[in-house]
Image (spheres, rainbow, N blue to C red):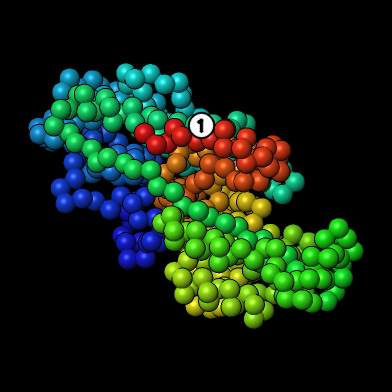
Amino acid sequence: MSDHLQHNVMPELKGFLFEGASQPATVIIYSPKITSRLRYACKFIFNQGLQINFLLIDNESEFLQSKLPKLNYSIKTVETAFNIYPNGLLSDNKLEKPELEYTKEGFDIFSAVFYHISRCEEWSLAKTDEHHRFVPTEIKQAPIVDIWIAELRTMLSTKFKSLQFPSRQFKFISTIDVDNVFAYKAKPLYRQIGGALKDLKNLKSRFATVFSGKKDPFDEYEFQVELSKKHNIPLIYFFLYCNNTNYDRTIDPNHPEFIKLLQYLNQNNITTGLHPSYYSTQNVDLLNEEQKLLSANSGKEVIASRQHFLRFNIKTTPKQLLKAGIHFDFTMGWSDKIGFRASTTLPFYYYDFESESELKLLAVPFAAMDGAFYLHQKSNANEAFRRRECLHYGNR
């Protein structure tokens, strides 16, 4: 885990990030050319994926003399090492897709993993939808990056009997995007009238909430908080904090009811994150304002977010979020499809191809949104539960 986050990591991510062990295993990796791309791939594969340390060197003599388990990343073959043969993606500034056909012997897992978690595909392709979101050429139904790393673990264990790897356990975080805090409550008269005219079938429920004090249909926060506590499941709310566009229709961020809710969540140690508004991807000042106001009203610095509509530009959004004080981004997934956008279940740092360096923004991926099932695929809860098999590959 990066040093700058060790004292500021979200409690929900404890156990997801490599923090080292008292005596973690170490492998030594030789490459005649060490690049930022190679180091980035190694950090993810060994620190995050295998949860061990690595020593990356370009001194062949030192490598051959080392007593550590050896991994050779060069065109040569070293009998005492596990050999991986580079295909070139990590040694230059190309954005071309590498050969990803899996073969156990010599497969360039470094390039393959780098291609997926760096989101090379999003950097090199410009096809977008009506909301300017990246349109993929294919959806990965399984986290193939995790599968490759699991295979590497098996092969290294076979090659080096003394090499021990920590065991992984499945962990789950519940994340909820709150586009509208309440269905009827805390909204001005003109919105009540407009909403009533558009939704006549629920007119009785609206009047009962607004005029008779009946519980708002969206007010399930206490139930969700208690459920989180009962089952010990971390809970994060991402609140939309803008209400003046056709795509941003929550209540006034400064409304007393909104602030009261934020204080309740804070008192119960529930994490509050930002759901950056629709146009914030085009307006950095707007993003900054939303982050500062939500931090002030919640009484706690907001450092996590997930983009509204999942509007995300890989070239600009990560840097904008960092400037706004965000260090954890939960956008990496699809709004209408089931699958793994970066082909992994594990958090990873975004990579910036303009500076050829790792950014200090941690991406926390997800496999499916509820809306992908019931809005886009017209599945009910039971059907969605039966289709969960494609999401199980990461628990290896």
Q: Residue furthest bottom?
A: 256
Label 1 packing within 10 angstroms: few (<14), some (14-19), many (20+): few
Figure disc tally: 1
Q: Which residue is mark 1?
A: 389
Residue 108 appears at what percent x and percent y? Answer: 37, 27
Q: Amino acid at mark 1?
A: Glu
- Name the residue located 77 percent from the left edge and 76 percent from the top edge: 212
Residue 266 appears at what percent x and percent y? Answer: 48, 73
Which quadrant of the structure image shows residue 90?
top left
Q: Nearer the viewer, residue 202 or 238?
A: 202
- Name the residue located 42 percent from the left edge and 36 percent from the top edge: 394
Residue 140 visible? The answer is no
Q: What element does badge 1 sit on?
A: helix
Q: Is residue 239 above or below residue 266?
A: above
- Name the residue located 53 percent from the left edge and 76 percent from the top edge: 263
Q: Nearer the viewer, residue 332 or 174?
A: 174
Q: Is residue 108 above or below residue 321?
A: above
